[in-house]
Image (cartoon, rainbow, N blue to C red):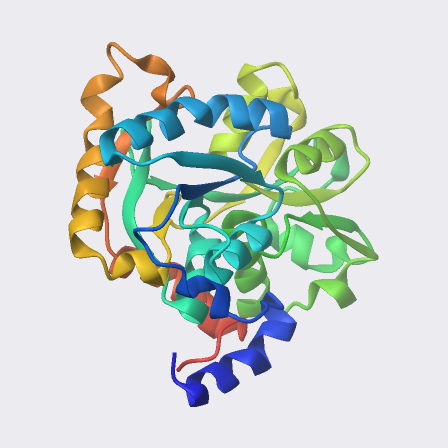
Amino acid sequence: MKPTRRHACSVLLGSVLALPSLTTAQRSPAAGPLRFGVGMFQPDRERNDASYRPLAAYLAQQLGRPVQLRTVDTWEGLARSLSTGETDLALMGPWGYVLANHFSDAQVVATILYQGKPEYFALIVTHPGSGLNSLDDLLGTKGIGRTFAFGDKGSTSGYLIPFHEFQKRGIDPEKHFARVLHTKHQAIQIQVTAGKLDAGADFNRNRDVMIAQGLISAANSRIIWQSQPLPNDAFAVSSVLAKDTAFVTRLQAALTGIGPRLATQPNLLPPDYTGFIASAHSAYKPIRDAGLATGKLVAR
């Protein structure tokens, strides 16, 4: 990384990710085990690790190298670890990937499929007793003084996309709402459906799974806004590994080969995930555009 670009990034990192020095990312891509970071897709670390151990073991077998799995609690934290070189491979949310790409040239190699689709939707939900029937209600006079929850600031559907929608409508959530929280997606749904929060940001897959598992009632989770389609989670590699084109080719082949294997090895991915498709940074342009529009990213 050139000193001038590194200096420009350091100004931004304090407000977005507060990333430390990137010098640790210089580890040789051929040295030691591959460190595989996974976001908190499940309600707790133990379940998350259990869900992705089979994928880590499969990748180790296909790539001929040990793969060390670690769950990272927040999307911000996972983006930071990929940027600093603490993580070599990462399965991460779209916004987290865009941040890691922007600040350290991490590169997506594949997009995960959910029920055969490479895309999903951000949502804003409320409960039936809120009296809020639309986003216009939430962002109009009916919504003034209410409580609202975002996901963590590294979340695409939980933060960036709904924040961008608020901005387009001229709304500063910190001024419009009486209280704004940042918490996990599962907690948002539970608190909204219990009436402890008036509304919150989520994504369709999380809501559907929580309903299917009986964690929330569909009758108590009302969708009042849905985004345009967003690219699914990214499987990304550090900037160092991205330069190893032979490795990236093997990794893409391993990931895209998972779909056919699920018929006999269904535990390679959590339920409803159906494989990967090869991907490139251009697929995540809508996320980057939202980051630039909100000022969370500065064009370089």
What's the residue at 45%, 73% (across, down)? 292
User: Which sits in the foreground, 186 or 139?
Assistant: 186
Up-down: is 69 above or below 77? Answer: above
Up-down: is 196 above or below 102? Answer: above
Lateral position of residue 132 relative to residue 218, left or right:
right
What's the residue at 50%, 85% (across, down)? 8
Residue 260 in sight from this viewpoint: yes
Q: Which quarter shows the C terminus?
A: bottom left
User: Which sits in the foreground, 219 or 33?
Assistant: 33
Looking at the image, the residue that sits furthest to the bottom is 4
The x, y position of residue 210, in whole percent, is 58, 23
User: Which sits in the foreground, 216 or 270?
Assistant: 270
The x, y position of residue 47, in whole percent, is 58, 22
Q: Which quarter shows the N terminus?
A: bottom left
Up-down: is 270 above or below 17? Answer: above
Looking at the image, the residue that sits furthest to the front is 31
Lateral position of residue 258 relative to residue 230, left or right:
left
User: Which sits in the foreground, 139 or 69?
Assistant: 69
The x, y position of residue 287, in whole percent, is 41, 60
The x, y position of residue 257, in whole percent, is 19, 29
Lateral position of residue 9 relative to residue 114, left or right:
right
Quadrant housing residue 98: bottom left
Looking at the image, the residue that sits furthest to the top is 264
What's the residue at 82%, 36% (across, down)? 196
What's the residue at 47%, 55% (across, down)? 82
